[in-house]
Amino acid sequence: MISSQKKTHPDLLYLEHALSPWQSNIMQGNYAFEQGALLEARDKYLLAKTLADHLLEQFLYAQINNNVSHAIEHCIPALVVASHNLADTYIAMQQPENACKWLCEVHLTLSSLIKHPHYDIQKVSKHHYIKTSSELVSFARRYPSFPELIEQVNFCLSSNTPSNKQLH
């Protein structure tokens, strides 16, 4: 009898288990955010971001093969989601400086990943890079009365990026 169940490679099973705490923290953060418990949401999102950062770093230092590439392709959006949720929480807390910090940090991380030698990693990085660029532009438009934040956004958008967009 032929099994219709898909066999999961041990590396991918590891990834599923490794991302489970990230997912749990994102969901708990989302619930806290929806309930207005912004400090709890911030803490959950920060933990999720830290988990995604560590996983991404582990896989980036591993020898690249299909499984490692697949893992990185999942860690990148996990990092972006956690960072953007963290930024949204700081915006809700009326702390745009902290929101800008997290948006810029994830954007600069993607900027460096675009230069990765593996095509699939470049591709997923570029996809999310475009999204973070758009998010940074929207953020800057939301806070035109904060020139120091506009300056930070411009720095992020122009730092070793494929295109040199700047807001004026």
Image (cartoon, rainbow, N blue to C red):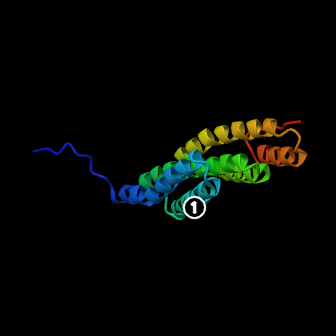
Q: Name the kind of residue labelled 1 in the image.
A: Leu
Q: Position of residue 106 (x, y in %)?
A: 67, 51
Residue in view at x 68 percent, y 49 percent: 87
In the depicted view, which residue is nearer to us: 18 or 145?
145
Task: Give the secondary structure at mark 1.
Answer: helix
**Residue placed under numbered mark 1 in the picture:** 47
Residue 142 against residue 45 in the figure, above or below: above
Asked whether the viewer can see residue 118, the reply is no
The answer to which image quadrant residue 138 occupies is: top right
Which quadrant, please, contains the C terminus? top right
Q: Position of residue 51 (x, y in %)?
A: 54, 61
Q: Residue furthest left?
A: 1
Q: Position of residue 55 (x, y in %)?
A: 52, 61
In the drawing, does residue 64 fall left or right of residue 101?
A: left
Q: Position of residue 9 (x, y in %)?
A: 33, 55
Residue 131 against residue 106 in the figure, above or below: above
In the depicted view, which residue is nearer to us: 163 or 54?
54
Residue 134 against residue 56 in the figure, above or below: above
Residue in view at x 85 percent, y 36 percent: 167
Which quadrant, please, contains the N terminus? top left
Residue in view at x 75 percent, y 54 percent: 98
In the drawing, does residue 70 fall left or right of residue 93?
A: left
Asked whether the viewer can see residue 119, the reply is yes
In the drawing, does residue 150 fall left or right of residue 47?
A: right
The answer to which image quadrant residue 158 occupies is: top right
In the drawing, does residue 41 fall left or right of residue 19?
A: right
* Crowd rating for badge 1 (residues with CA inside 10 Å; few <14, some 14–19, many 20+): some
Q: How many marks?
A: 1
